Image (cartoon, rainbow, N blue to C red):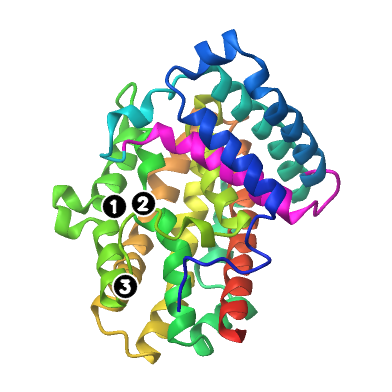
Amino acid sequence: MNFNSQTDSTALDFAYQELEEEFLELLGLDNLDRVISKHPERAENFKSELKVSLSAAFRNETGCPQAHLFLQRILYRINRLKLFWYDGLENYVNEDSAFLFSLRLEIEDAWQDWEESNTVRRSSGTLSAVLRDRVQEDLQPEPSPDGLFIRNEISKSGYQCLLAITSLDGLVEASQLSRMLGGVGNEVQMMLTRILWEEYGSGKFSRKHSTHFATMLEECDMDSRPETYFDLVPWEVLANINHNFYLSERKKNFLRYIGGLLYTEVSVPAAFENIKMAGERLKMGDKGVSYWDLHIREDIRHGQWMLDDVTLPLIEKYPEQGWDMVKGYDQQKFISFRSTAAIVETIRRFEFF
């Protein structure tokens, strides 16, 4: 099955395709800011259409899926410049562009306001008790319909589709965490560094988690180059990635990022168990499920570390602002569920056709 060809509901429509191509032309200009300063008309149409897209995406609780996809693709292309891809250095000529910075802010401001309106959850009790209750709830949850579908129903092509979509993040895993480690040394920083160290294979490339993901792709006769399957990725999955960029690039959001990371580390073992069982059912072999297996084993420990050695000490340090960790936890849970639902929907379409 050709995962590089988009399904109708995932693909951008023609108007958005043209607009994205216009953005890519701007992105590739040598000294973008200077060009726009001398020729502002070069960007006028894009900026005008961007405002229309923002209105379409965030006008109500759901918005226009095509507008969401376009905006999240644009935002991802800007955000990825924060990471180094070991490609041509000329690709980073506009990484500090004021124009790109203004576009990112315009999209993020509208998008984050919309996201916050979708994730309101009441909490009662002390901050530490609230976080402990949430962790307990998500450690061994009842299987969701989406989880059961992945575990019991997807075919080999569905499993490959899942790998294709999740490869966008899996092949550069934990990169956003690396952006949060600089600064004054303390026990919290050391624990976060320890988690990153394990994610990065304790300094051995063969043990790095993203290497395991690449091995899974190769075992399934798929392309293991980063971003190969970008065009297949639903906007909800891009939003999950972009949300982590949004939090990790702003130190004022540090506590929200920590809350989101706590949810991720706590919830991954149960979620990945479904995918591992699907791979085993499909006889994908040990290498074909190695990434899921590794996370199941390590993230049980990481979740406990995040609770005991990161979030609880931060509550003592920030007793009032610490509620941002609950906000980050709840928001990441919502965004993750939405992302999984979108992946399952895409798999169903591929298997139907």
Tell me which numbered mark, 2 or 1, is placed earlier along the sequence: 2
Give how far apart the Cα atoms at labels 3 and 1 are: 13 Å
At label 2, counting other C-alpha atoms closer than 10 Å, the crowd grade (few under 14, some 14-19, many 20 or more) is some
Percent coordinates x, y for residue 41 in the rendering: 67, 18
Examine the residues drawn in magenta and state their main secondary structure: helix
- Mark 2 vs mark 3: give the one in front: 2
Pick whichever, 247 or 284, lies toward us: 284
Q: Which residue is mark 2?
A: 173
Q: Identify residue type, mark 2.
A: Glu
The reply to whether the C-beta atoms of the residues labelled 2 and 3 are less than 8 Å apart is no
Q: Which residue is mark 3?
A: 293
The answer to whether residue 173 is above or below residue 160 is: above
Pick whichever, 22 or 105, lies toward us: 22
Q: Identify residue type, mark 1.
A: Glu
Label ID, residue 199: 1
The answer to whether residue 86 is above or below residue 9 is: above
Percent coordinates x, y for residue 342 in the rendering: 62, 66
Q: Which residues are magenta?
A: 58-84
* Residue at image location 80% in from the left, 51% down from the top: 63
* Residue at image location 31% in from the left, 68% down from the top: 291
The reply to whether the C-beta atoms of the residues labelled 2 and 1 are less than 8 Å apart is yes
In this image, 301 relative to 63: left or right?
Answer: left
